[in-house]
Image: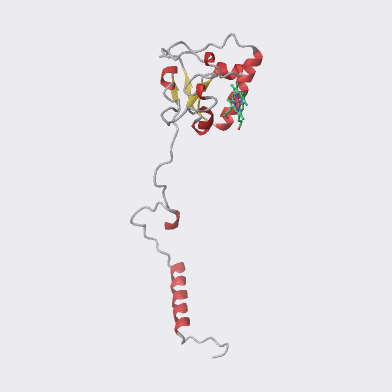
Amino acid sequence: MGLSFDLGTPVNTALLLYILYSVQRIIFPSTSAPKTIPNEFKAGYSWMPKAHPPTVLFKTFTPKTLEPFNGKDGGRILLAINGIVFDVTAGRNFYGPNGMYGNFAGRDASRGMAKQSFDLEMLTPVDEQLDSLTDLKPDEIDNMKGWIEHFSNKYIVCGKLINNDAN
Ligand code: HEM
């Protein structure tokens, strides 16, 4: 047989048929839509995710409606600083029930962030008016703003905090 190309051998015939088939698929691609919408990439380019990715809705919270988001049930963890509500679920190690800053979970953390303290007396009871923060010194306000900056870069803002009796 030598180096010559023998179309007659079964292997070459099979390969030739395969090449012809592939060329035919390239020249005349199938344009019919798939019967089911593929949800995995291997099924083609027009695929859909199995489920809609989780979305976050910007909501208005009050101290009472924020409080359940304390992570004690394993669910989402939210906290507020100066009226801005952050979803800190990704920081469960910090804010979960065993976290160093668990006190802030589900609460207005403004005063604690300003005064750099996680003592319980930093928190305003959830059935009272929002902490006015008017007694804070300028450097404490600055410290609080620094934390807002940190949280804005790390977590998702998911709402604002207003008084229980507002609207
Ligand atoms: C006992 C002294 C303290 C130690 C050893 C400590 C240690 C730490 C450490 C290691 C981190 C993680 C930093 C990172 O990975 O980005 C952290 C973050 C943080 N600390 Fe402290 N800390 C202390 C006191 C406080 C106090 C008194 C507050 C009160 C406001 C506080 C508030 C925070 C906050 C809000 C974060 C950011 C967590 C986040 O990114 O979600 N820390 N701390």
Give the answer, above or below, for where 19 lies relative to 107. below
Q: Position of residue 30 (x, y in %)?
A: 40, 63
* Residue in view at x 36 percent, y 57 percent: 34
The tally of labels here is 0
Q: Looking at the rendering, in which quadrant would you find the N terminus? A: bottom right
Instruction: Single out the residue that lies furthest toward the front.
Output: 98
Give the answer, above or below, for where 156 lies relative to 44. above
Give the answer, above or below, for where 57 lies relative to 29. above
Instruction: Single out the residue that lies furthest toward the right.
Output: 139
**Depth order, front residue of 86/52:** 86
The quarter of the rendering in which ligand 1 is drawn is top right
* Residue in view at x 42 percent, y 57 percent: 43
Instruction: Write down the quadrant of residue 4 in the picture.
Output: bottom right
Q: Position of residue 147 (x, y in %)?
A: 60, 24
Q: Position of residue 106 (x, y in %)?
A: 46, 23
Instruction: Single out the residue that lies furthest toward the bottom.
Output: 1
Q: Looking at the rendering, in which quadrant would you find the C terminus? A: top left
Give the answer, above or below, for where 161 lies relative to 37. above
Instruction: Single out the residue that lies furthest toward the left.
Output: 35
**Depth order, front residue of 132/125:** 125
Q: Position of residue 108 (x, y in %)?
A: 50, 19
By what rule are the colours in the image chosen?
secondary structure
* Residue in view at x 43 percent, y 21 percent: 67
**Depth order, front residue of 79/132:** 79
* Residue in view at x 44 percent, y 79 percent: 14
Instruction: Write down the quadrant of residue 45 in the picture.
Output: bottom left
